[in-house]
Amino acid sequence: TTVSLLAGIALAVGGFLTAATLPDPAIALNALLQGWRQFASVTSLPPSQVEAIIADVWTVAAAFSGYAGSWSHFLPIITLPILTLLWWIFFGIVAFGVARAMGGQGSLNATMGASALIVAPLVFHVAAIVPFAGVSGMMVSIWGMLIGYRAIHISHELTWRSAAWATVIVYLAALVALLLVTLAFSAGYAAGGYQ
């Protein structure tokens, strides 16, 4: 969690410095809505409904990205370590189950210990302390996936193909879980959202 905490601090400071160099969020939203009105006049789409959706999405995006200012810049300091811990637990438990189902011999402790290294690539997020600088999220994800593969391969003494499939299955399980959570939130938003 130390690596994710350092990455979260760097993301928070970098986000604050980046937001300080950007135009006022109200001006950016106004420009976005004006562009939408021009697009809607050409395509004859109902502008009022879409403007309401854009305003709602903008409010949430500005708050969570830190663009709106306030305390939202500090969210990565809290969320990144928590999400990293949850991902490690999810990865370790699911990888253990999948690897054992594929004939692996490793213990849960060995799997959790070896898979703890999947957070190591997060150290590159420290570069985000510089405004408008960052690391490719895809690079960090793929590197973490390769570390996860190696953790399964070593801790369960599987063949490279079985370990690769076990790793892919863990990521597919995570994708399905994220999809279900997204669908649940979308259904809640469509039903009227939080009131």
Image (tube, rainbow, N blue to C red):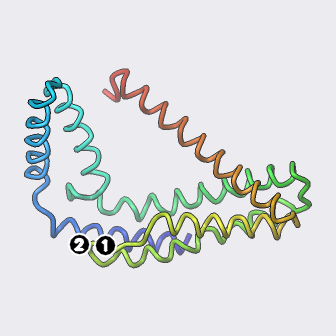
Q: Residue at x 52, y 37 (%)?
A: 181
Q: Position of residue 93 (x, y in %)?
A: 74, 53
Q: Position of residue 32 (x, y in %)?
A: 14, 45
Q: Position of residue 37 (x, y in %)?
A: 9, 35
The residue sitting at the top extreme is 191
Residue identified by numbered label 2? 17
- Front-most of 41 and 178? 41
Q: Residue at x 64, y 52 (%)?
A: 171
Spatial separation of the CA atoms under disc 1 and disc 2: 6 Å
Q: Residue at x 26, y 74 (%)?
A: 131
On screen, residue 19 versus residue 164, left or right, reads left
Amino acid type of the residue tagged 2 in the rendering: Leu
Q: Is residue 169 above or below residue 10?
A: above
- Front-most of 63 and 170? 170
Amino acid type of the residue tagged 1 in the rendering: Val
Q: Is residue 51 above or below residue 143?
A: above
On screen, residue 73 versus residue 21, left or right, reads right
Secondary structure of residue under mark 2? helix
Residue identified by numbered label 1? 13
Q: What is the quadrant of the C terminus in the image?
A: top left
